[in-house]
Image: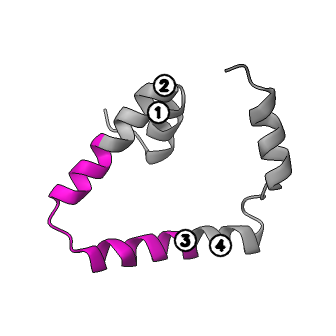
Amino acid sequence: MAYSLAEIGDQALRLSPEDRARLALQLLARLEESGESAEEIEKLWIAEAERRFQELRSGVVQGIPAGEVFSVLRAKPS
């Protein structure tokens, strides 16, 4: 059964912070192995940033003020 990117993301966010970090490192290592040049990777990051910016501008997603994010993080137990 194939999973959507959203489903995989939801599952990944349920992992512990340590496991999420390990997963992120594994994914980054695979990207580096993919043979894509630094320029290609930079273009992909720019495209992703532009996509996210357009989502914000169009109202598809809502931004969260940094102060609110940091307040929530500070309130979480260590």
Q: Which of 60 and 67 is in front in this view?
A: 67
* Label 4, residues with CA under 10 Å away: few <14, some 14-19, many ≥20: few
Q: How many labels does the image show?
A: 4
In the rendered structure, which disc, 1 or 4, sits on the residue that comes first in sequence? 1
Q: In this view, does 34 lie to the left or right of 75?
A: left
Q: Name the residue under label 4.
A: 53
Q: In which quarter of the image is the C terminus?
A: top right
* Secondary structure state at the residue bearing disc 4: helix
Amino acid type, callout 3: Ala
Distance from disc 2 to disc 4, alpha carbons, whole Å, reads 27 Å
Give neighbour class at mark 3: few <14, some 14-19, many 20+ (Cα, 10 Å). Answer: few
Q: Find out whether the residues at labels 2 and 1 contact each other: C-beta distance under 8 Å.
A: yes
What kind of residue is marked 4?
Phe
Mark 1 vs 4: CB contact within 8 A: no
Q: Which mark is residue 49?
A: 3
Give the CA distance from mark 3 to mark 1: 21 Å
**Between residues 57 and 19, which one lies in front from this camera angle?**
19
The CA distance from mark 2 to mark 3 is 25 Å
Crowding near the residue tagged with mark 1, few <14, some 14–19, many ≥20 C-alpha atoms within 10 Å: some
Residue 49, magenta (yes or no): yes
x then y, percent, for residue 34: 17, 60
Q: Quick check: marks 3 and 4 in contact, CB under 8 Å?
A: yes
Query: Where does label 2 land, which residue?
Result: 15
State yes or no: residue 6 in magenta: no
> Which quarter of the figure has residue 32?
bottom left
- Residue kind at label 2, given as amino acid type: Leu
User: What whole-number distance in Å separates the C-alpha atoms at marks 3 and 4?
Assistant: 6 Å
